[in-house]
Amino acid sequence: MGLDDKIKNAAEDLTGKGKEATGKATDNERLEAEGKGDQTKSDVKQAGEKVKDAFKH
């Protein structure tokens, strides 16, 4: 996993957590769900990168 990819995935995860927290605080279910979705996408990307890394070694 390249450093650039790690940074992008971490940023996407943090953005998702922020959206989720804002959604909960404002009782906005759509924003909360969008935040959870962003976190899930980030997790999937990180898992895919880890699999790639495992095959490189």
Image (cartoon, grey):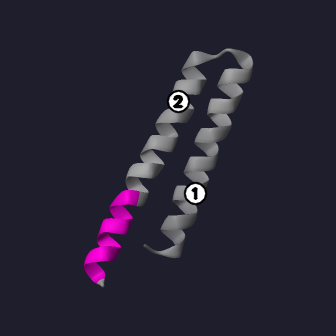
Q: Is residue 54 magenta?
A: yes
User: Does label 1 or label 2 sit earlier along the sequence?
Assistant: 1
Label total for image: 2
Highlighted magenta segment, given as a residue range? 47-56
Q: In the rendering, which numbered label is found on residue 34?
A: 2
Res 22 quadrant in image: top right
Residue under pointer 1: 10
Quick one: SS at disc 1?
helix
Residue at x-position 63% and y-position 40%: 17
Please state if 37 lies on the left or on the right of 22 as rendered: left
* Above or below: residue 34 compared with residue 8: above
Residue at x-position 63% and y-position 44%: 15
On the image, the x and y values in percent for residue 20 come to: 62, 31
Q: Separation of disc 1 and disc 2 at Cα?
A: 16 Å
Quick one: SS at disc 2?
helix
Mark 1 Cα shell of 10 Å, populated few (<14), some (14-19), many (≥20): some
On the image, the x and y values in percent for residue 34 come to: 52, 30
* Above or below: residue 34 compared with residue 47: above
Identify residue type, mark 1: Ala
Q: Is residue 9 magenta?
A: no
Identify residue type, mark 2: Glu
Quarter holding the N terminus is bottom left
Quarter holding the C terminus is bottom left
Residue at x-position 37% and y-position 58%: 47
Among all residues in the image, which is located at the extreme bottom? 57
On the image, the x and y values in percent for residue 26 come to: 73, 18
Q: Main secondary structure of the magenta part?
A: helix
Mark 2 Cα shell of 10 Å, populated few (<14), some (14-19), many (≥20): some
Q: In the rendering, which numbered label is found on residue 43?
A: none
Please state if 47 lies on the left or on the right of 11 as rendered: left
Residue at x-position 44% and y-position 50%: 43
